[in-house]
Amino acid sequence: MPTTLTQHIVQYIDDRRAVKVEAFEKECDKEKAKITSVEDADTFEANRSAKVAKLELDFTVTHWLDSAAKRAGQISMATHAIKFSHSAAKGTNVLAENLGSDPRYVDTFSIASPAVDAVGNAAALDVARLLQLKDNAGKSLLAYLQEDNIEPLAPLANTPEQLQEWQHGLKQALRDSAPSSHTLAKQVYFPVAQGEYHLLAPLYSSSLSQALYSEINHSRFSQEMKAIRDARKANLPCENLLVAYPNLAVTISGGSKPQNVSQLNSGRGGRTYLLDTRPPTWRNQQQQPKDNNQLFNHSSLLFNTERTVKRIADFMLCILHKPSNLKRREYIQRMVEQIGEQVINDIAIWQQQPAGWTNTYHQLPMHHAQWLDPNNPRWSEKNEDWRDRVSAEFGLWLKDRIDKAAGSGQTFRLSQGEADEWRQTFKQLLWEMK
């Protein structure tokens, strides 16, 4: 409703005034403490009264909106910002609208409500926040202006001419009168005919980055996901799904001044998450384990877990003389779970073999065969819990591998206690991923 948005605009300006007044009063208190004479006190009070009067004038609704309309041209409301290519690039930012979307791709318009960013003079970002104010239905002042609808501003203007000035001035943040690229922007020559090209200038979608950032942060830090992880650690049932994004990378835009790139970038602290898009690693046909010595020491299991095992060993060496704490224990626990999940994923390749394939491998222990060949009819009447024996072997295997990865000059050696703890971890994973 335009009426509620009008109220939000008035409240926003009043809140801005309160912040300025509070900062001004603190500064006055500091200056007042330095006064040593009656003349200085009189001068101080006169200056203070003049500044208070100016503040009150500046933050009257009409005066502030007059100023906002004049400053709006210093910013660009955008979904795609050029400064993500290079913080010194000065080309056009784009507020993309109604471009359509393709269900085969995750793009800006696959988001239900893409966030709108603001790029430009950081001193004018208060105007951007004004344009992003919404009514109770979720429609922003920006959306009203895009429709040439000035109902939210109409009750605040003194004259029709003033209202038109506000509309014209604020809309300067929505368009660029002289679109341009820049030498520091990305550009691609795309061939379209014999000797002819289109010059493409791809722009970074800050809106898509914001959606990805919010989703990943929710999976990592929200109370909902924390409750699910706590239930998992305590072996308690939970109806909700645990969402995780492994192997993330992070890029930083803007260095120590992310606000110089964009408003949303500043809110993210300059961070942008990158998902793992590496192609799958080619695997040759893996030879099935035939005896007790080949399972956990199979080449594929050793290769796929080697890096994580080394990370645990290096971390333990780094904290060797430091006190144990929850954060360090949880880090090791996460790495152990990662190794366990990798082992189970590798074993799944053999579990997909035709049922009964282990019948010809008589040297393969029964508990290994039950794990590797779960659909074998031979197990229909078996009651033994093979998970206990497999988990115990995993705990000892991982303990020995970490000891070995720490090197011959190591100053620690893991005990049966660690093997028992990791046995329980792996057994839990077997039940969860069966």
Image: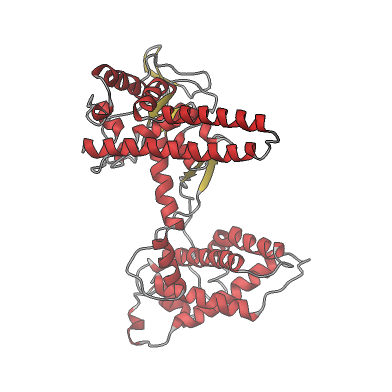
In the orientation shown, which residue stands out farthest toward the top?
Answer: 195
In the picture, the quarter occupied by the C terminus is bottom left
Residue 152, percent from left and from top: 25, 31
- Colouring of the image: secondary structure
**Side (left or right) of 151 relative to 298:** left
In the orientation shown, which residue stands out farthest toward the right?
Answer: 409
Residue 305, percent from left and from top: 56, 61
Give the total of numbered labels.
0
Q: Is 214 located above or below residue 89 in the figure?
A: below
Q: Is 157 located above or below residue 135 in the figure?
A: above
Q: Quadrant of residue 331?
A: bottom right
**Side (left or right) of 147 relative to 17:** left
Q: Quadrant of residue 193?
A: top left
Q: Residue at x 39, y 37 (%)?
A: 14
Q: Residue at x 25, y 19 (%)?
A: 159
Residue 186, percent from left and from top: 48, 24
Q: Which residue occupies the foreground of this view, 321 or 294?
A: 321
Q: Quadrant of residue 418?
A: bottom right
* Residue 203 visible in the picture: no
In the picture, the quarter occupied by the N terminus is top left
Q: Which residue occupies the foreground of this view, 205 or 413?
A: 205
Q: Which residue occupies the foreground of this view, 134 or 238?
A: 134
* Residue 88 visible in the picture: yes
Residue 126, percent from left and from top: 43, 32
Q: Is 217 located above or below residue 328 in the figure?
A: above
Q: Which residue occupies the foreground of this view, 376 or 425?
A: 425
